[in-house]
């Protein structure tokens, strides 16, 4: 088990804002519930990032419980970085493009 802090790319805020209306349309306060599930997911990543499988090269994927969304992240020596929170119903090529664009400078 390898516990370490989690940080986020700036784009994560926009990812979460984009998900909110979708879940609010399902149920009253659905966006709030989605954010709670996301925070729970971050806790799991923080606790043991190696628990989750590699999906594309160095990117690992964790599915956010009771949602269509997942978080892609990378494990670095002293921190785990969440790179994207995306709707997983998109094609694999689109998901890979998102990851490629967001990590182009690294």
Image: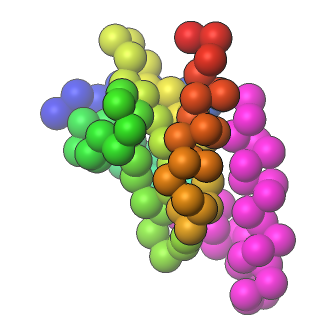
- Pick whichever, 27 or 99, lies toward us: 99
Residue 69 in view = no
Residue 32 in view = yes
Quadrant of image for the N terminus: top left
Residue shown at 28% from the left, 46% from the top: 52
Q: Quadrant of residue 51?
A: top left
Percent from the top left, x then y, of residue 78? Answer: 38, 13
The residue stretch that appears in magenta: 10-37
Quadrant of image for the C terminus: top right
- Pick whichever, 10 or 37, lies toward us: 10
Q: Is residue 106 shown above or below 46?
A: above
Q: How is the image coloured?
A: rainbow
Percent from the top left, x then y, of residue 65? Answer: 45, 69
Residue shown at 23% from the left, 28% from the top: 2
Q: Quadrant of residue 50?
A: top left
Q: Tell me the chief SS of the magenta region.
A: helix
Instruction: Please give left or right for residue 18 compared with residue 35 in the image.
Output: right
Instruction: Please give left or right for residue 10 compared with residue 105 in the image.
Output: right
Percent from the top left, x then y, of residue 90? Answer: 59, 62
Residue shown at 38% from the left, 38% from the top: 56
Q: Is residue 2 shown above or below 34?
A: above
Instruction: Please give left or right for residue 60 compared with residue 88 in the image.
Output: left
Residue shown at 53% from the left, 41% from the top: 96
Outermost bottom residue: 27
Is residue 74 highlighted in magenta?
Answer: no
Q: Is residue 77 shown above or below 17?
A: above
- Pick whichever, 8 or 3, lies toward us: 8
Is residue 18 highlighted in magenta?
Answer: yes
- Pick whichever, 66 or 86, lies toward us: 86
Outermost left residue: 1
Percent from the top left, x then y, of residue 59? Answer: 40, 34
Q: Quadrant of residue 34?
A: bottom right
């Amino acid at each position: 088990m390898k516990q370490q802090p989690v940080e986020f790319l700036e784009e994560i805020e926009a990812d979460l804002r984009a998900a909110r209306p979708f879940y609010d349309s399902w149920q009253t306060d659905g966006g709030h519930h989605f954010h709670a599930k996301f925070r729970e997911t971050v806790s799991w990543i923080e606790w043991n990032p190696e628990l989750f499988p590699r999906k594309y090269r160095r990117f690992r994927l964790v599915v956010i419980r009771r949602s269509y969304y997942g978080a892609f992240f990378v494990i670095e020596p002293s921190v785990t970085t969440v790179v994207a929170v995306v709707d997983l119903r998109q094609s694999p090529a689109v998901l890979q493009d998102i990851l490629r664009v967001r990590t182009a400078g690294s």
